[in-house]
Image: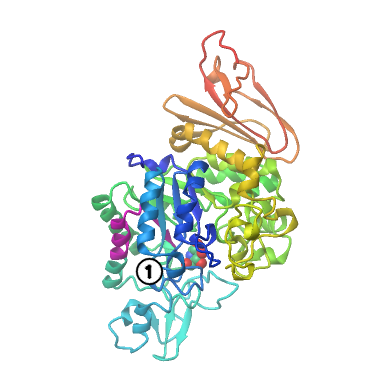
């Protein structure tokens, strides 16, 4: 059963997955809800606390479900509402929560709301969307999908007006100035909350309203609306959460916590690329600098920290110089780029370097916030940059070396996407079954680290962070502290070995204990404490006050 701590999300590890990609239970080539149910033991053994499901609602799937045609039903290939209820029940029985993606800003142009709106300019649904006779209004709003769209307006030939869309032109924006829309989306939320969903990952939250003379992002009206939603959650669904997808600069991203009266969580978009930049530059500054800008946040709120997700690794909110570093280090082939970002999975991004993969996980497991893992990254899955859009990072989960990576028994041609067969990442070796057999596999390592993180969930999830001063910019070091527990974390960001002298005077007399193995290090004294570090290595050391004579 799930625990009843209302702050559960602060200690949790999240696991993002697409129903389509996880497991195909009926062998039609497409993953489904029953497939997720069949793999519940895997999810439980992995040790994560909450599944985040990408959109599973009825959709023409022109943006992988972010184009919803019916908010109250499930994509038929994925399953039925009853199966979904069973999924929730079984997840909860296993102590796992489930949050669902909710696309509020826009819907599909196939949604009956839009069909009706374009059937007649006087239709009651007309005002559910944003119309104009010209395509020049709100010119301060940027275009997000720059590789596909040239304008945020699209022409509707039947009723002869332009409609507003921040994403693909087949995704008309809903008009949040219309109270009917605001009410309808709340109704949608209640529908799924009543079914037992544990919260929502709210898609594209900055863009709900449009105002002339602004960039149409993060407007006060948007915040007001989310405050209303939060009130509804607090009053009627305590313990459920709202997680904001607001890809913004730190000051704007932080606003979505409100005064603890908006989102419980928001993705730490500012931090994500800076972790990769810190590695590329072998310099802790990009990380310490951005953490200083993203903290403090209101108590009871938390960042969701992630390395990769189902989209391109977004580089919208970085400087031109930072973007250049990212492209030259991580996207040498033009096909690796999409919009302002990099469409690659985690393992290929770092050339499958095991030490770097471990370091990256150790960072997101110990920096302030709740880690969010992307399915497949725990086994080091590869990608396919030759598939269109972001499909290259959305290929079938690799379960075994059987046909179709054990994902489906359909004919391979029938799969929604080919599995990864690139020699370096071929599913014949990168798969759950093979990695379970090999004690040294990435999967075993990630599982172990999840357990260690859970054991110290409070200090990592809720603790303060203090960066330690020293003179080696290649090493990031901080102490996380919570209720008397002090966890010293040290990371060598460089590709070469290095050493470090730390002044730990405040902890004189304490014994650093390496928490993965339990090995105690020499007691801290008055002199600087000396560390040697392998390339891209890290230590997590619990600073313990041990009885005299307590040995290893
Ligand atoms: C953000 C989602 O993560 C992305 O996949 C989608 O294309 C856009 N929002 C539009 O809904």
Describe residue 241's horizontal placement relative to residue 401 as left or right: left
- Picture residue at 58% right of the left edge, 58% below the top: 407
Residue 459 x/y as whole percent: 46, 32
Quadrant the C terminus occupies:
top right
Residue 192 belongs to the span the image colors magenta: yes
Q: Residue furthest left?
A: 235
Give the number of callouts.
Answer: 1
For the residue labelled by badge 1, is the local secondary structure a helix, a strand or a loop? loop
* Numbered range of the magenta stretch: 186-203
Describe residue 386's horizontal placement relative to residue 302 as left or right: right
Q: Is residue 264 visible?
A: no
The local crowd at label 1, few if under 14, some if 14 to 19, many if 20 or more residues have their Cα within 10 Å, is: many
Residue 313 x/y as whole percent: 59, 58
Q: As displayed, is residue 310 above or below residue 151?
A: above
Q: As displayed, is residue 312 above or below residue 115?
A: above
- Picture residue at 37% right of the left edge, 53% below the top: 88
Residue wearing tag 1: 209
- Picture residue at 45% right of the left edge, 53% below the top: 37
Q: Is residue 522 visible?
A: yes
Residue 257 x/y as whole percent: 38, 50
Q: Based on the displayed image, in which of its 4 quarters is residue 342 positioned?
A: bottom right
- Picture residue at 36% right of the left edge, 68% below the top: 73
Quadrant the N terminus occupies:
top left
Q: Nearer the viewer, residue 268 or 505?
A: 268
Residue 341 x/y as whole percent: 61, 62
Residue 462 belongs to the span the image colors magenta: no
Q: How is the image coloured?
A: rainbow
């Amino acid at each position: 059963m799930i625990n009843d701590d209302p702050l559960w999300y602060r200690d949790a590890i999240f696991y993002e997955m697409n129903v389509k990609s996880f497991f195909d239970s009926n062998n039609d080539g497409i993953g489904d809800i029953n497939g997720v149910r069949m793999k519940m033991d895997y999810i439980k053994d992995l040790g994560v606390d909450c599944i985040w499901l990408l959109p599973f609602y009825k959709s023409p799937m022109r943006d992988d479900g972010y184009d919803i045609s019916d908010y109250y039903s499930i994509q038929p290939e994925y399953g039925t509402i009853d199966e979904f209820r069973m999924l929730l029940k079984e997840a909860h029985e296993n102590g796992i929560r489930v949050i669902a993606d909710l696309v509020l800003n826009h819907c599909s142009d196939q949604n009956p709301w839009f069909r009706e709106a374009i059937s007649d300019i006087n239709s009651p649904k007309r005002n559910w969307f944003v119309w104009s006779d010209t395509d020049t209004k709100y010119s301060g709003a940027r275009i997000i999908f720059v590789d596909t769209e040239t304008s945020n307006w699209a022409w509707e030939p039947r009723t002869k007006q332009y409609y507003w869309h921040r994403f693909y032109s087949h995704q008309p924006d809903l008009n949040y100035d219309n109270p009917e829309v605001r009410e309808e989306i709340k109704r949608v939320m209640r529908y799924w909350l009543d079914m037992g969903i544990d919260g929502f990952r709210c898609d594209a939250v900055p863009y709900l309203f449009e105002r002339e003379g602004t960039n149409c992002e993060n407007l006060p009206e948007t915040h007001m609306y989310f405050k209303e939603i939060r009130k509804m959650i607090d009053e009627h669904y305590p313990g459920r959460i709202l997680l904001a997808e607001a890809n913004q600069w730190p000051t704007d991203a932080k606003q979505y916590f409100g005064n603890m009266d908006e989102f419980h969580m928001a993705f730490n978009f500012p931090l994500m690329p800076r972790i990769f930049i810190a590695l590329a530059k072998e310099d802790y500054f990009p990380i310490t600098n951005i953490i200083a800008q993203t903290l403090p946040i209101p108590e009871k709120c938390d960042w969701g920290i992630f390395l990769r997700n189902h989209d391109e690794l977004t580089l919208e909110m970085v400087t031109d110089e930072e973007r250049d570093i990212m492209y030259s280090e991580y996207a040498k082939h033009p096909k690796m780029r999409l919009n302002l970002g990099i469409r690659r999975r985690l393992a290929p991004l770092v050339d499958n370097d095991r030490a770097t993969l471990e370091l990256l996980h150790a960072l997101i497991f110990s920096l302030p916030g709740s880690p969010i893992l992307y399915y497949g990254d725990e086994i080091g899955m590869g990608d396919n940059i030759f598939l269109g859009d972001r499909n290259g990072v959305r290929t079938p989960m690799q379960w075994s070396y059987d046909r179709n990576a054990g994902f489906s028994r359909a004919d391979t041609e029938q799969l929604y996407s080919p599995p990864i067969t690139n020699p370096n990442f071929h599913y014949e070796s990168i798969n759950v079954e093979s990695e379970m057999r090999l004690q040294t596999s990435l999967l075993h390592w990630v599982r172990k680290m999840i357990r260690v993180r859970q054991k110290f969930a409070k200090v990592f999830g809720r603790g303060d962070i203090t960066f330690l001063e020293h003179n080696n910019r290649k090493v990031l070091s901080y102490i996380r502290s919570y209720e008397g527990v002090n966890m010293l974390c040290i990371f060598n960001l460089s590709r070469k070995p290095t050493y470090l002298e730390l002044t730990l005077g405040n902890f004189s007399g304490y014994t650093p204990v390496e928490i993965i193995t339990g090995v105690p290090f020499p007691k801290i004294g008055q002199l600087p404490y000396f560390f040697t570090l392998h390339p891209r290595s890290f230590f997590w050391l619990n600073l313990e006050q041990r009885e005299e004579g307590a040995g290893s």
